[in-house]
Amino acid sequence: MVEILDNIDQREMVINMGPQHPSTHGVLRLELVLDGEIIKKVTPNIGYLHRCFEKYAEQMDDYSKVIPYTDRMDYVSAINQEHGYVLAMERLLEIDVPERVEYIRVIMAELQRIASHLLGIGAFGLDLGAFTPFLYCFTEREKILDIFERTTGARLLYNYMAVGGLMKDVHPEFKTDTADFLKTFRPKIKELNDLLSYNDIFIKRTANIGVLPKQVAINYGASGPVLRGSGVQWDLRKNDPYSIYEKFDFEIPVGMGEMGTLGDCWDRYIVRVREMEQSLRIIEQALDGLPEEGDVTEAVPKRIRPKNGSIYTRSESPRGELGYYIESNNSASPYRVKARAPSFVHLGMLPAISKGSLIADLVAIVGSIDIVLGEVDR
Amino acid sequence: MLNTVKEGWTTFKSIFTGMGVTMRHLFGPSVTLQYPDEKMELPKGARAKLYVNIDDCIGCNLCARACPVNCIDIETVAATSDVDLGKTSTGNPKRFWLTRFNIDMAKCMYCDLCVYPCPTDCIYMVPEYEYSEFDRSGLVYHFSNLKPEMVAEVKEKAEKEAAEKKRQKEEMMRKKAEEKKRKELEKQKLEANKSIKEDDSSSKPENNDS
Amino acid sequence: MIEGFINNLPMITILVHAAIPLTIILVYALVAIWGERKIAGFIQDRLGPMRVGGWHGWAQSIADLLKLIQKEDILPKDASRFLFRFAPFMMFAASYAAFAVIPFSSSYIGSNINIGVFYLLAVTSVLTLSVIMAGWASNNKWSLLGGMRSAAQMVSYEVPTIATVLTVIVVSGSLNLMTVTEMQSGNDILGFLPNWFIFQNPFLIVAFIIFFISILAESHRVPFDLPESESELVAGYQTEYSGMRWAMFMLAEYADMLLLSLLGAVLFFGGWNSPFGEFMGGPAWGFFWFMLKGLLLVFVMMWIRWTLPRYRVDQLMHICWSILIPLSFINLVLVALWEVIFN
């Protein structure tokens, strides 16, 4: 028997997952070294969606022309990307933004956060074979996109925020539209929980899988739901408040290892679900506080020409800490723009947390860290 | 053993809860539209296609400069003094013939940045989204309403006028130069006279302008 | 009368007996594929196919079939040519052959042999072989993984399937499916319930649940669709197939679904027996009731398909070996005890 086993040609199988694979969330290529179905090694290969965002930003002859390109980084949460960029620019130019603008920005950013989490959750379910929750999530996401479309005119890449203000005011029924959405959305979260979150098969597939311990998460520079899923209370909206987030009362949901180990896929997933509820709370408060009157374009500078200097500003995008480093050399175009994309950082953790798991788990892990390849490659 | 039974029970319970949800949806209404038959009503400001109201365009080129992807291509020819192009509906006087105003919708990224700087609000997005083409060149929209022969005529005229103006300008320049020379000569003469008179300023600084 | 006629001409007999299940399978497959898409659509708040053929896109499957016929038959360069070509046909043949012993109506059964159930289970195990064959012959790593998974899965789940079928055999005492069905005629339980096996013995309800879970796994349906789990293995053993060969896999899969559902209907729900006793009885109604029961089970399978995520491969094995198999054997003993004590 031993002889036979010795004579068997035992080889590890190298397999290419992606760039065209149903559950690599775009054009990610993973080089897997497999022993049967057990993963020995994962090497993420990126760059299939590289569009030279940073270099392109330097070529623009106007700072505001960069905004449409920031949309295209993380195309699932375009508003948050713009928000980060205009925040950086406003700090660089020392502009005070009108209160109405801040309120509208917060409402839009939180709506976008819900939309992005819906997509992340739905796609995660899809990776595990649950097709239907994905479409329910999309139905809800469509409603948010409808609000966005009526306000900004676009459904995905909005180019809505301007340095110092907004491109245009919200549409007249914005308040009632959003309030209606809030009303219909709460029961849908419960439905989603029934259908997916607390489904036993789903829990079995996600609990204890892809465990990311607290210390490892911090060491790798994780942020956003991935870090909070590991039990760290870290949310830039609370810990480093920007815009007017310190005015609102909300909680930071963290993973608690309810279904398995702290920091597993289920924790990361449920943090997103609970964050949607918190976003609803923020939107409710912001709708109440939204000033009725005010010109949203009043603080928009005619010409943007910052002095020599540089700035790093971070904001909480649905995926984590989104930072923009902008260096200006007293001309109309930025000298250097660097984006710190959370997805890129999180993708770097993938080899560490997926070693020794099965292919099916790898799919779950990739789904749970919710990367967007547009942001990874930029 | 008891644990297994309990586990099995929670599994079945959660499965049946999920199946209850899908069963409710099975008899629920559909949220989709049967696209070519029914169409979604796009809101007023929807960004789907660029449109230029060429009658209002003054050829200021601001939109082309605002475009991050350079998809707007404008060529203007100054109107000759004998033609009055009238005014736009917003009251701005028109001074240029728009011999070319092309927008390449294949390049356009629908960012709306060209819309804001327009002084006459003549370029804007319209909610029209069904404009696929078999050929990429079909996506280049020509908004200029001048006929080719008209373009040629206008250009010729403009050239003539420009040449005339150039000639006039040159003449002016020449005259000016002559004037300047004359004045300088006079000045030199004057200074020469002065120096003769004073006869003590040897280290006078050189007079240089600009 | 008709039987008397065709029995005189052996060749025609064989052809007719071969053609009837084939027709049923083909018509069913067209309807079921359309139906699955409609059900998926309605569950997901969509409408499903709507355009081909007018009313609710009824001709969609036919259009798909025509499209598949026209597609290029792609053979990968390094594939094992014979096995690659042969696997889909073998798979369909296996599920088709099993239909021979299914009693469609009180007056029609393909082959009234006395080891019907045994034959059916034996023939369907060939499905495993064809899936491995397809996975191996494609010379594709994803296909190979799919084939491996499927081999493990189908071999394992055959055990609880057979064990639960055995429980019914213990009650009925016959391997002939026609006899099994005939034993379930009448409405005697509690005065109104039909004499179906599922009502005869409380342990047979447990047996049915185990049987249903196992046939979900046997026919590769969610939550056990690991061999072709599209989000992990692209399409598993079907990855390299296209056109009609792929259609054969699809057809076989749907046929398998129907076959196992019909087996469930025979074993637990009285086959072609009407639920109302003599009312709406007779061969024609029998066929109707039988198909209705089978299709209801198929519907439940589809309903589950569009609700649940899928298990992981080790969990699948765990469910089979450490839950279903012990449970089904304990259940077998309990059913036997019940039979000894009460009958």
Image (cartoon, helix red, strand yellow):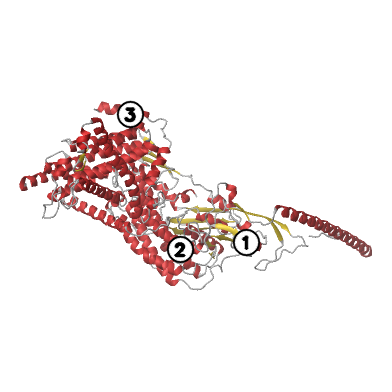
Q: Nearer the viewer, mark 2 or mark 3?
A: 2
Chain letter for mark 2, please: A
Mark 2–mark 3 Cα distance, whole angstroms, equals 60 Å
Counting from the top left corner in percent of width and height, residue C296 is at 25, 50
Relative placement, left or right, of C20 versus B51 is left
Q: Residue at x 24, y 37 (%)?
A: C98
Q: What's the chain of the residue with tag 3?
A: A
Q: Position of residue A296 (x, y in %)?
A: 53, 68
Q: Quadrant of residue C333?
A: top left
According to the picture, the residue beneath numbered tag 1 turns out to be: B53
Instruction: Give the residue number, with chain letter if any, for mark 2.
Output: A147
> Which chain letter goes with mark 1?
B
Q: Is residue C282 visible?
A: yes
Query: Do the residues marked 3 and 1 share a common chain?
Result: no
- CB under 8 Å between discs 2 and 1: no
Q: Are marks 2 and 3 on the same chain?
A: yes
Apparent side of residue C45 relative to residue B194 in the rendered image (left or right): left
Circle 3 SS class: loop
Neighbourhood count class around disc 2 (C-alpha, 10 Å): few under 14, some 14–19, many 20 upward: many
Residue at the disc numbered 3: A9
Q: How many residues crowd mark 1 within 10 Å: few (<14), some (14–19), many (20+)?
A: few
**Cα gap from disc 2 to disc 1, whole angstroms:** 28 Å
Amino acid beneath label 2: Ile
- Please tell me whether mark 1 sits on a helix, a strand or a loop: loop
Query: Please, what is the three-letter code of the amino acid marked with disc 1?
Result: Asn
Number of the front mark, 2 or 1: 1
Badge number at residue C66: none
Q: Quadrant of residue C88?
A: top left
Where A92 sits versus C10, above or below? below
* Kind of residue sitting beneath label 3: Asp
Question: Residue A250: percent from the left, percent from the top?
Answer: 38, 66
Q: Are marks 2 and 1 on the same chain?
A: no
